[in-house]
Protein backbone atom coordinates (compact mmCIF):
# COMPACT_ATOMS: atom_id res chain seq x y z
CA UNK A 1 0.00 0.00 0.00
CA UNK A 2 1.31 3.45 -0.94
CA UNK A 3 0.27 5.13 2.34
CA UNK A 4 3.05 5.02 4.92
CA UNK A 5 2.67 3.07 8.15
CA UNK A 6 3.00 6.29 10.15
CA UNK A 7 0.13 7.89 8.28
CA UNK A 8 -2.01 4.76 8.54
CA UNK A 9 -1.43 4.73 12.29
CA UNK A 10 -2.30 8.42 12.54
CA UNK A 11 -5.44 7.94 10.47
CA UNK A 12 -6.58 5.20 12.80
CA UNK A 13 -5.96 7.27 15.93
CA UNK A 14 -7.37 10.53 14.65
CA UNK A 15 -10.35 9.45 12.60
CA UNK A 16 -13.15 9.46 15.17
CA UNK A 17 -14.24 13.10 15.05
CA UNK A 18 -14.07 13.27 11.27
CA UNK A 19 -15.86 9.93 11.02
CA UNK A 20 -18.74 11.22 13.13
CA UNK A 21 -18.84 14.38 11.02
CA UNK A 22 -19.09 12.38 7.80
CA UNK A 23 -21.70 10.00 9.24
CA UNK A 24 -23.66 13.04 10.30
CA UNK A 25 -23.70 14.37 6.75
CA UNK A 26 -25.09 11.05 5.52
CA UNK A 27 -27.74 10.98 8.24
CA UNK A 28 -28.83 14.53 7.50
CA UNK A 29 -29.34 13.60 3.86
CA UNK A 30 -31.37 10.56 4.87
CA UNK A 31 -33.49 12.00 7.70
CA UNK A 32 -33.32 15.75 7.09
CA UNK A 33 -31.07 18.31 8.77
CA UNK A 34 -33.78 19.22 11.28
CA UNK A 35 -33.98 15.61 12.49
CA UNK A 36 -30.28 15.03 13.22
CA UNK A 37 -28.71 16.65 16.29
CA UNK A 38 -25.00 17.11 15.71
CA UNK A 39 -23.01 17.63 18.91
CA UNK A 40 -19.84 16.08 17.54
CA UNK A 41 -17.69 18.79 15.94
CA UNK A 42 -16.36 21.92 17.63
CA UNK A 43 -17.29 24.14 14.71
CA UNK A 44 -18.96 27.19 16.27
CA UNK A 45 -22.07 28.49 14.52
CA UNK A 46 -21.93 31.82 16.34
CA UNK A 47 -21.21 34.64 13.92
CA UNK A 48 -18.01 36.69 14.39
CA UNK A 49 -18.35 39.91 16.37
CA UNK A 50 -19.53 43.04 14.51
CA UNK A 51 -16.05 44.54 14.86
CA UNK A 52 -14.64 41.72 12.73
CA UNK A 53 -17.03 42.39 9.87
CA UNK A 54 -16.45 46.15 10.15
CA UNK A 55 -12.70 45.65 9.89
CA UNK A 56 -13.11 43.48 6.77
CA UNK A 57 -15.21 46.21 5.15
CA UNK A 58 -12.72 48.91 6.14
CA UNK A 59 -9.81 47.03 4.59
CA UNK A 60 -11.77 46.03 1.49
CA UNK A 61 -12.75 49.64 0.88
CA UNK A 62 -9.31 51.03 1.71
CA UNK A 63 -6.77 48.52 0.40
CA UNK A 64 -3.09 49.29 0.56
CA UNK A 65 -0.64 48.32 -2.13
CA UNK A 66 0.62 44.76 -1.71
CA UNK A 67 -2.05 43.89 0.86
CA UNK A 68 -2.37 40.35 -0.52
CA UNK A 69 1.32 39.72 -1.16
CA UNK A 70 4.10 38.04 0.76
CA UNK A 71 5.54 39.61 3.85
CA UNK A 72 8.39 38.34 6.04
CA UNK A 73 7.79 34.75 7.17
CA UNK A 74 7.15 35.85 10.75
CA UNK A 75 4.22 38.00 9.67
CA UNK A 76 3.52 41.72 9.62
CA UNK A 77 5.52 43.51 12.36
CA UNK A 78 2.48 45.68 13.15
CA UNK A 79 0.27 42.64 13.76
CA UNK A 80 2.91 40.89 15.85
CA UNK A 81 3.31 44.07 17.88
CA UNK A 82 -0.45 44.22 18.48
CA UNK A 83 -0.43 40.60 19.70
CA UNK A 84 2.54 41.38 21.95
CA UNK A 85 0.71 44.36 23.44
CA UNK A 86 -2.33 42.19 24.20
CA UNK A 87 -0.19 39.50 25.85
CA UNK A 88 1.50 42.24 27.88
CA UNK A 89 -1.92 43.43 29.08
CA UNK A 90 -2.89 39.86 30.01
CA UNK A 91 0.32 38.81 31.75
CA UNK A 92 2.14 41.95 32.87
CA UNK A 93 5.20 40.61 31.03
CA UNK A 94 6.52 42.88 28.28
CA UNK A 95 6.20 41.17 24.89
CA UNK A 96 6.89 42.81 21.55
CA UNK A 97 6.87 41.84 17.89
CA UNK A 98 10.26 40.21 18.56
CA UNK A 99 8.49 37.55 20.67
CA UNK A 100 5.64 36.74 18.26
CA UNK A 101 5.29 34.90 14.95
CA UNK A 102 1.96 34.75 13.12
CA UNK A 103 0.77 31.20 12.37
CA UNK A 104 -1.77 29.25 10.33
CA UNK A 105 -4.12 28.56 13.21
CA UNK A 106 -3.27 26.88 16.50
CA UNK A 107 -2.52 23.59 14.73
CA UNK A 108 0.06 25.32 12.57
CA UNK A 109 1.48 27.08 15.62
CA UNK A 110 1.89 23.83 17.58
CA UNK A 111 3.59 22.11 14.65
CA UNK A 112 5.98 25.03 14.18
CA UNK A 113 6.83 24.96 17.89
CA UNK A 114 7.39 21.20 18.01
CA UNK A 115 9.42 21.20 14.80
CA UNK A 116 11.67 23.87 16.29
CA UNK A 117 12.45 22.19 19.61
CA UNK A 118 12.32 18.41 19.02
CA UNK A 119 15.21 16.11 18.26
CA UNK A 120 14.28 12.57 17.13
CA UNK A 121 13.27 10.56 20.18
CA UNK A 122 12.56 13.55 22.42
CA UNK A 123 9.57 13.02 24.70
CA UNK A 124 6.48 15.20 24.83
CA UNK A 125 4.21 14.77 27.84
CA UNK A 126 0.45 14.86 27.23
CA UNK A 127 -2.30 14.76 29.82
CA UNK A 128 -5.11 12.28 29.20
CA UNK A 129 -7.72 12.95 27.87
CA UNK A 130 -6.01 14.81 25.05
CA UNK A 131 -7.07 16.51 21.85
CA UNK A 132 -7.12 13.83 19.19
CA UNK A 133 -4.43 15.25 16.87
CA UNK A 134 -1.74 15.98 19.48
CA UNK A 135 -0.39 12.47 19.06
CA UNK A 136 0.05 13.04 15.33
CA UNK A 137 1.61 16.47 15.79
CA UNK A 138 4.32 15.03 18.03
CA UNK A 139 5.03 12.14 15.69
CA UNK A 140 5.18 14.56 12.73
CA UNK A 141 8.49 15.75 14.16
CA UNK A 142 9.89 12.41 15.35
CA UNK A 143 8.94 13.00 18.96
CA UNK A 144 7.67 10.37 21.38
CA UNK A 145 4.31 10.82 23.10
CA UNK A 146 4.34 10.09 26.82
CA UNK A 147 0.82 10.02 28.33
CA UNK A 148 0.29 11.38 31.84
CA UNK A 149 -2.92 10.62 33.77
CA UNK A 150 -5.33 13.10 35.31
CA UNK A 151 -7.58 12.73 38.37
CA UNK A 152 -11.34 12.18 38.51
CA UNK A 153 -11.85 15.89 37.76
CA UNK A 154 -9.45 15.71 34.78
CA UNK A 155 -6.84 17.81 36.56
CA UNK A 156 -3.18 16.81 36.12
CA UNK A 157 -1.78 14.21 38.49
CA UNK A 158 1.31 16.09 39.68
CA UNK A 159 3.02 13.04 41.13
CA UNK A 160 2.57 11.23 37.83
CA UNK A 161 3.87 14.28 35.97
CA UNK A 162 7.04 14.36 38.05
CA UNK A 163 7.58 10.61 37.66
CA UNK A 164 7.14 10.82 33.86
CA UNK A 165 9.95 13.31 33.27
CA UNK A 166 13.25 11.88 32.03
CA UNK A 167 16.43 13.34 30.51
CA UNK A 168 14.71 13.02 27.10
CA UNK A 169 11.66 15.10 28.11
CA UNK A 170 11.54 18.18 25.92
CA UNK A 171 8.03 19.54 26.35
CA UNK A 172 4.77 19.41 28.24
CA UNK A 173 1.92 20.13 25.80
CA UNK A 174 -1.08 21.51 27.67
CA UNK A 175 -4.55 22.71 26.67
CA UNK A 176 -6.50 24.96 29.04
CA UNK A 177 -9.44 25.52 28.84
CA UNK A 178 -9.40 21.91 27.82
CA UNK A 179 -10.83 20.04 24.87
CA UNK A 180 -12.66 17.68 25.59
CA UNK A 181 -13.34 18.34 29.30
CA UNK A 182 -13.75 22.10 29.68
CA UNK A 183 -11.32 22.10 32.63
CA UNK A 184 -9.31 25.26 33.35
CA UNK A 185 -5.87 24.98 34.96
CA UNK A 186 -5.89 27.57 37.74
CA UNK A 187 -2.87 29.61 38.85
CA UNK A 188 -1.85 27.40 41.77
CA UNK A 189 -1.79 24.33 39.55
CA UNK A 190 0.21 26.14 36.87
CA UNK A 191 2.72 27.17 39.53
CA UNK A 192 3.10 23.62 40.81
CA UNK A 193 3.61 22.24 37.29
CA UNK A 194 6.21 24.90 36.53
CA UNK A 195 8.02 24.14 39.81
CA UNK A 196 8.24 20.47 38.82
CA UNK A 197 9.61 21.32 35.38
CA UNK A 198 12.27 23.64 36.82
CA UNK A 199 13.28 21.01 39.37
CA UNK A 200 13.77 18.46 36.60
CA UNK A 201 15.57 20.96 34.37
CA UNK A 202 18.07 21.54 37.15
CA UNK A 203 18.45 17.81 37.80
CA UNK A 204 19.06 16.85 34.18
CA UNK A 205 20.65 20.05 32.88
CA UNK A 206 17.96 20.35 30.20
CA UNK A 207 15.25 22.74 29.03
CA UNK A 208 11.65 21.54 29.31
CA UNK A 209 9.14 23.70 27.48
CA UNK A 210 5.51 24.27 28.26
CA UNK A 211 3.78 24.39 24.88
CA UNK A 212 0.38 25.89 25.64
CA UNK A 213 -2.48 25.38 23.18
CA UNK A 214 -4.98 28.02 24.24
CA UNK A 215 -7.56 28.97 21.59
CA UNK A 216 -10.27 28.90 24.31
CA UNK A 217 -8.50 31.16 26.83
CA UNK A 218 -11.09 33.92 26.40
CA UNK A 219 -14.03 31.49 26.69
CA UNK A 220 -14.10 31.05 30.48
CA UNK A 221 -17.11 31.03 32.80
CA UNK A 222 -18.17 31.93 36.32
CA UNK A 223 -15.70 34.78 36.72
CA UNK A 224 -12.60 32.57 36.47
CA UNK A 225 -9.38 34.08 35.15
CA UNK A 226 -6.97 32.48 32.72
CA UNK A 227 -3.44 32.11 34.15
CA UNK A 228 -0.85 32.17 31.37
CA UNK A 229 2.15 29.81 31.65
CA UNK A 230 4.25 32.85 30.73
CA UNK A 231 3.77 33.98 34.35
CA UNK A 232 5.18 30.75 35.75
CA UNK A 233 7.84 29.31 33.43
CA UNK A 234 10.32 31.12 31.22
CA UNK A 235 10.56 28.18 28.85
CA UNK A 236 6.97 28.71 27.69
CA UNK A 237 5.63 28.81 24.15
CA UNK A 238 2.09 29.99 23.44
CA UNK A 239 0.50 28.35 20.39
CA UNK A 240 -2.98 29.64 19.72
CA UNK A 241 -5.50 31.03 17.26
CA UNK A 242 -8.49 33.33 16.93
CA UNK A 243 -10.65 30.46 15.66
CA UNK A 244 -12.83 30.32 18.77
CA UNK A 245 -12.60 33.76 20.43
CA UNK A 246 -13.58 35.49 17.16
CA UNK A 247 -15.54 32.48 15.80
CA UNK A 248 -13.48 32.30 12.59
CA UNK A 249 -12.06 28.74 12.58
CA UNK A 250 -11.99 28.52 8.79
CA UNK A 251 -9.78 31.59 8.45
CA UNK A 252 -6.78 29.80 10.03
CA UNK A 253 -5.13 32.71 11.81
CA UNK A 254 -3.13 32.38 15.00
CA UNK A 255 0.32 32.95 16.45
CA UNK A 256 3.29 31.55 18.32
CA UNK A 257 4.61 33.61 21.24
CA UNK A 258 7.84 32.90 23.12
CA UNK A 259 8.64 34.05 26.65
CA UNK A 260 10.99 37.05 26.28
CA UNK A 261 13.30 35.61 28.96
CA UNK A 262 13.54 32.18 27.36
CA UNK A 263 17.07 30.82 27.15
CA UNK A 264 18.52 31.27 23.64
CA UNK A 265 15.53 33.47 22.82
CA UNK A 266 16.83 34.93 19.56
CA UNK A 267 17.97 31.56 18.21
CA UNK A 268 14.57 30.12 19.14
CA UNK A 269 12.74 32.87 17.26
CA UNK A 270 14.95 32.34 14.22
CA UNK A 271 14.14 28.63 14.42
CA UNK A 272 10.41 29.29 14.65
CA UNK A 273 10.56 31.50 11.57
CA UNK A 274 12.57 28.89 9.69
CA UNK A 275 10.09 26.13 10.58
CA UNK A 276 7.18 28.31 9.48
CA UNK A 277 8.78 28.33 6.05
CA UNK A 278 10.01 24.75 5.73
CA UNK A 279 6.75 23.23 6.96
CA UNK A 280 5.16 24.88 3.96
CA UNK A 281 3.12 27.55 5.72
CA UNK A 282 5.42 30.32 4.34
CA UNK A 283 3.40 32.92 6.26
CA UNK A 284 0.04 33.25 7.95
CA UNK A 285 -2.83 34.52 5.73
CA UNK A 286 -2.03 38.12 4.84
CA UNK A 287 -5.56 39.55 4.82
CA UNK A 288 -6.47 37.97 8.16
CA UNK A 289 -3.29 39.33 9.74
CA UNK A 290 -4.49 42.80 8.82
CA UNK A 291 -8.05 42.12 9.99
CA UNK A 292 -7.19 40.83 13.47
CA UNK A 293 -4.53 43.47 14.15
CA UNK A 294 -7.04 45.86 15.70
CA UNK A 295 -9.24 43.16 17.27
CA UNK A 296 -6.97 41.83 20.00
CA UNK A 297 -9.37 42.97 22.74
CA UNK A 298 -12.52 41.77 20.93
CA UNK A 299 -14.27 38.49 21.80
CA UNK A 300 -17.52 36.80 20.90
CA UNK A 301 -20.40 36.77 23.40
CA UNK A 302 -19.10 34.31 26.01
CA UNK A 303 -22.36 34.62 27.93
CA UNK A 304 -24.13 32.76 25.14
CA UNK A 305 -21.80 29.78 25.54
CA UNK A 306 -22.21 29.87 29.31
CA UNK A 307 -25.98 29.74 28.87
CA UNK A 308 -25.59 26.65 26.68
CA UNK A 309 -23.16 25.14 29.20
CA UNK A 310 -25.69 25.59 31.99
CA UNK A 311 -28.51 24.10 29.91
CA UNK A 312 -26.70 20.93 28.88
CA UNK A 313 -25.00 20.41 32.24
CA UNK A 314 -28.19 20.87 34.26
CA UNK A 315 -30.12 18.49 32.03
CA UNK A 316 -27.46 15.77 32.05
CA UNK A 317 -27.18 15.94 35.84
CA UNK A 318 -30.97 15.76 36.15
CA UNK A 319 -30.91 12.59 34.05
CA UNK A 320 -28.32 10.98 36.30
CA UNK A 321 -25.17 11.30 34.16
CA UNK A 322 -21.87 11.73 35.98
CA UNK A 323 -20.23 14.84 34.60
CA UNK A 324 -17.83 17.58 35.65
CA UNK A 325 -19.11 21.10 35.07
CA UNK A 326 -17.04 22.76 32.32
CA UNK A 327 -15.19 25.91 33.35
CA UNK A 328 -14.37 27.03 29.82
CA UNK A 329 -14.35 26.18 26.09
CA UNK A 330 -17.58 24.65 24.71
CA UNK A 331 -17.23 20.93 25.40
CA UNK A 332 -18.65 18.66 28.07
CA UNK A 333 -17.35 15.15 28.81
CA UNK A 334 -19.88 12.95 30.63
CA UNK A 335 -19.28 9.40 31.79
CA UNK A 336 -21.12 6.75 29.78
CA UNK A 337 -23.71 4.66 31.64
CA UNK A 338 -21.97 1.63 30.09
CA UNK A 339 -18.24 1.02 29.79
CA UNK A 340 -18.28 0.63 26.00
CA UNK A 341 -18.37 4.25 24.86
CA UNK A 342 -18.24 3.30 21.17
CA UNK A 343 -21.36 1.13 21.51
CA UNK A 344 -23.12 3.86 23.48
CA UNK A 345 -22.36 6.50 20.85
CA UNK A 346 -23.45 4.19 18.05
CA UNK A 347 -26.79 3.51 19.75
CA UNK A 348 -27.30 7.21 20.50
CA UNK A 349 -26.74 7.96 16.84
CA UNK A 350 -28.80 5.16 15.31
CA UNK A 351 -31.73 5.23 17.69
CA UNK A 352 -31.96 8.92 18.57
CA UNK A 353 -30.07 10.72 15.78
CA UNK A 354 -27.72 12.43 18.23
CA UNK A 355 -24.09 12.68 17.12
CA UNK A 356 -21.34 12.66 19.75
CA UNK A 357 -17.72 11.44 19.95
CA UNK A 358 -16.60 8.47 22.07
CA UNK A 359 -14.01 8.99 24.79
CA UNK A 360 -11.56 6.63 23.09
CA UNK A 361 -10.97 9.40 20.53
CA UNK A 362 -9.38 11.36 23.38
CA UNK A 363 -7.46 8.46 24.90
CA UNK A 364 -9.96 7.25 27.53
CA UNK A 365 -12.74 4.67 27.58
CA UNK A 366 -16.14 5.11 29.20
CA UNK A 367 -16.79 8.77 28.37
CA UNK A 368 -18.22 10.75 25.48
CA UNK A 369 -17.76 14.32 24.28
CA UNK A 370 -20.55 16.73 23.40
CA UNK A 371 -20.17 20.22 21.96
CA UNK A 372 -22.54 23.07 22.77
CA UNK A 373 -21.33 25.68 20.27
CA UNK A 374 -24.53 25.04 18.35
CA UNK A 375 -28.05 26.51 18.33
CA UNK A 376 -30.70 26.30 21.05
CA UNK A 377 -33.01 24.09 19.01
CA UNK A 378 -30.36 21.42 18.37
CA UNK A 379 -29.50 21.27 22.07
CA UNK A 380 -33.16 21.10 23.10
CA UNK A 381 -34.06 18.41 20.58
CA UNK A 382 -31.09 16.25 21.55
CA UNK A 383 -32.17 16.00 25.19
CA UNK A 384 -34.90 13.32 24.73
CA UNK A 385 -32.27 11.00 23.24
CA UNK A 386 -30.02 11.38 26.28
CA UNK A 387 -32.99 10.90 28.59
CA UNK A 388 -34.07 7.73 26.77
CA UNK A 389 -30.54 6.32 27.08
CA UNK A 390 -30.41 7.27 30.74
CA UNK A 391 -33.65 5.40 31.39
CA UNK A 392 -32.55 2.37 29.42
CA UNK A 393 -29.31 2.03 31.37
CA UNK A 394 -30.77 2.71 34.81
CA UNK A 395 -29.57 6.26 35.52
CA UNK A 396 -33.15 7.40 36.21
Image (cartoon, rainbow, N blue to C red):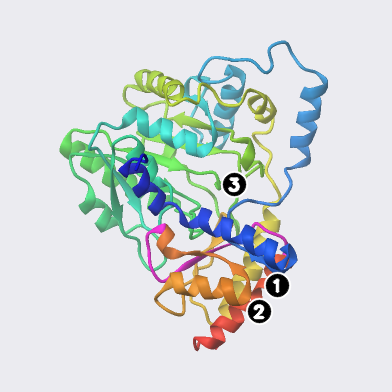
| 225 relative to 45 in the view: left or right | left
> Residue placed at 63% from the left, 26% from the top?
289
In the rendered image, residue 372, in percent from the top left (x then y), is placed at: 63, 61
> Residue placed at 45% from the left, 74% from the top?
343
Q: CA distance from mark 2 to mark 3?
A: 32 Å
Q: Quadrant of the C terminus?
A: bottom right
Q: Kindly tell me whether residue 135 is visible in this rendering.
A: no
Q: Residues within 10 Å of mark 2 (few under 14, many from 20)?
A: few
> Residue placed at 18% from the left, 33% from the top?
205
Q: CA distance from mark 2 to mark 1?
A: 7 Å
For residue 66, which numbered disc appears in the image? none
Name the residue at the top extreme: 65
To which quarter of the image does residue 82 belong? top right
| 277 relative to 373 in the view: left or right | left
In the rendered image, residue 35, in percent from the top left (x then y), is placed at: 71, 69
- SS class of the residue under badge 1? helix
- Pointers 2 and 1 in contact (CB under 8 A)? yes
- SS class of the residue under badge 2? helix
Judge whether 282 appears above or below 142 on screen. Answer: above
**337 inside magenta stretch:** no
In the rendered image, residue 350, in percent from the top left (x then y), is placed at: 58, 73
Please give the residue where the numbered disc 2 appears in the rendered image: 384
Decide which of 251, 30 is in the foreground and name it.
30
Judge whether 198 appears above or below 38 on screen. Answer: above
Please give the residue where the numbered disc 1 appears in the rendered image: 381
Q: Which segment is the magenta one? A: 362-376
Q: Quadrant of the N terminus?
A: top left
Q: CA distance from mark 3 to mark 1?
A: 28 Å
Please give the residue where the numbered disc 3 appears in the rendered image: 218
Q: Which of labels 3 and 1 is toward the front?
A: 1
Amino acid sequence: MSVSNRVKKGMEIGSWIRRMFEEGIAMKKKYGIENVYDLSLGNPIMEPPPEFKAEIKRLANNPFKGMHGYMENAGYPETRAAVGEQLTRETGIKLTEKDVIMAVGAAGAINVALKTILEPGDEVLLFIPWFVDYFNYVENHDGVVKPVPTDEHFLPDLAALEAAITPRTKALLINSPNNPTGVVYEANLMQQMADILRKKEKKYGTEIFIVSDEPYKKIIYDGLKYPSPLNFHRHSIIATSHSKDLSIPGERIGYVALHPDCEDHDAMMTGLVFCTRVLGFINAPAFMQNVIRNLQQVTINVGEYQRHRDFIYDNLVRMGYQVNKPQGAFYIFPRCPIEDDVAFIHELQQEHHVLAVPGIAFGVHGYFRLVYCTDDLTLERSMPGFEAMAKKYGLI
